[in-house]
Image (cartoon, rainbow, N blue to C red):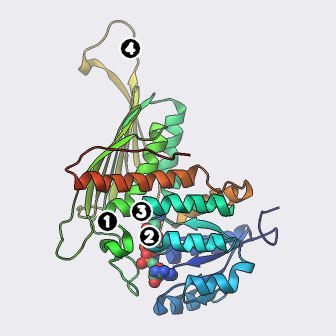
Amino acid sequence: MLKCKDGKTLKGAVIGYGFISGKGHIPSYLERAKQKGDVKIIAVADICEARRELAKKTIPEVRVYSDYQSLLKAESQNLDFVDVSTPPCDHARIAMAAMDAGLHVLCEKPLTTTLEEASALLKHAANTKRVLFPCHNYKHAPVVKTIRDVIESGKIGTVRSVTLSTYRNTHAKGVTEWKTDWRRHHEFSGGGIAMDHGSHSFYLTFEWLNTYPTAITAKMSNLEPQKYDTEDNFSAVLTFPNGLAHCHLSWTAGVRKVIYTIQGDQGAITVDDDDMQIAVQHKTSGPEVAQGAVEWKVEKRTISSDWMDASHVSWFNALFEQFKEAIEKDEYVGKEAKEAYRCIEIISKAYESAKNNCLEQKLLGIQS
Ligand SMILES: NC(=O)c1ccc[n+]([C@@H]2O[C@H](COP(=O)([O-])OP(=O)(O)OC[C@H]3O[C@@H](n4cnc5c(N)ncnc54)[C@H](O)[C@@H]3O)[C@@H](O)[C@H]2O)c1
């Protein structure tokens, strides 16, 4: 039996009916409701009237509210969880109010815009005994799952360094009815591309290097300072006990794609969106051979991962499955929530480093 009010269906409300919830989360909930019947969205809140009108038209079965407070007041008795899909400046406030109303929280990345808020939010989840779960959806991209399988197979040996480059030809834009450029305004976003996309790169480094970083140095730029007050390019090196991770993020690239490389002591994985190459050193017996004489076994695969669809709708169901499991197991502040906290620590310290001529900053991680 599901751990929810009626024992059958997790009832949810979505706060923020914008791009990610309209194109990603809600279509996935509706499909899951049809296929499995274990989730139902009963309410939506959005502060923008045009978005509320669209919600009423697109999902007529859902009750629509003009803010999260009135939604929680009217609906919390009927709900099990809230899905926070607003810009980051409001994540902590909405998540805490939902927990106070007795609800579990699925929260879009970045978890919060400051480390203080992240710390308070994790404590709040533990105190109210409500699950806090971040949308770390890149873990569910098919090509990322294949990277996981290859690393776990031992084929490339022990991972010693990784690089993650994310190229976008523009900043990600929100729906046009509200503030489409909110990511370039600090008051809504808390930061630019590091705040917006950094979490995805950082939680992947934790997985690939199988540990957590201890320090960071970072550099960033804003090519349109007269227009915007957040960064559009970001480069960082994370120090891990067993290697290094280089993360590069750009909103001013000539292309939209990810390029990831994972270097092991026996071989390497190179990913360019859906295309993966696995190169493994061919073991030669006898004396050491000169560099050019090493033989490589190279395997190429294409793993369709829908990278061009920014809503990543096809990855959401697996993420929701994890959230449901956390609810079943009373994992109020589980591994994913703690990793979301670490991502916010990394982003905060990256901003410190960039402000101080790339001065290395220590990362303390979770203290208790
Ligand atoms: N995980 C991913 O791959 C992914 C992809 C895109 C966006 N996101 C995240 O989703 C969140 C939303 O981004 P988006 O692209 O959908 O933005 P968006 O601008 O398209 O949508 C935001 C919506 O929230 C509404 N809103 C703003 N403040 C609100 C508040 N206080 N209460 C209720 N409604 C409010 C706006 O009217 C708008 O409709 C962000 O945290 C973003 O980082 C995640």
C-alpha gap between disc 4 and disc 2: 53 Å
Image quarter in which the N terminus is found? bottom right
Q: Give the number of callouts.
A: 4
The correct choice, above or below, for 330 with respect to 31 in the image is above
Tell us which disc is closer to us: 1 or 3. 3
Q: Disc 3 on helix, strand or loop?
A: loop
The verdict on label 2 being within 8 Å of ligand 1 is yes
The residue lying at 41 percent from left, 65 percent from top is 113
Which residue sits at x=55%, y=74%?
94
Query: Mark number for residue 88?
Result: 2
Of callouts 4 and 2, the N-terminal one: 2
Upstream in sequence: badge 2 or badge 3: 2
Report the residue marked by disc 4: 284
Disc on res. 325? none
Asked if residue 15 lies left or right of residue 197, the reply is: right
Is 221 or 147 nearer to us in this picture? 221
Dot 2: element: helix
Tag 1 or tag 2, which sits nearer the N-term?
2
User: Which label sits on residue 114?
Assistant: 3
Specify which label sits upstream in the sequence, 1 or 4.
1
> Of the residues tagged 2 and 3, which is closer to the observer?
3
| In this rendering, position of residue 129 left or right of residue 242 | right
| Nearer to us in this view, 251 or 333 | 333
* Kind of residue sitting beneath label 1: Gly
Mark 1 vs mark 3, CA separation in Å:
13 Å
* Residue nearest the viewer, comparing 364 with 341: 364
Nearer to us: label 4 or label 2:
2
Q: Are marks 2 and 3 in contact (CB under 8 Å)?
A: no
Distance Cα–Cα, label 1 vs label 4 = 48 Å
Residue to which mark 1 is pinned: 192
**Of helix, strand and loop, which one carries label 1?**
loop
Q: Amino acid at mark 4?
A: Thr
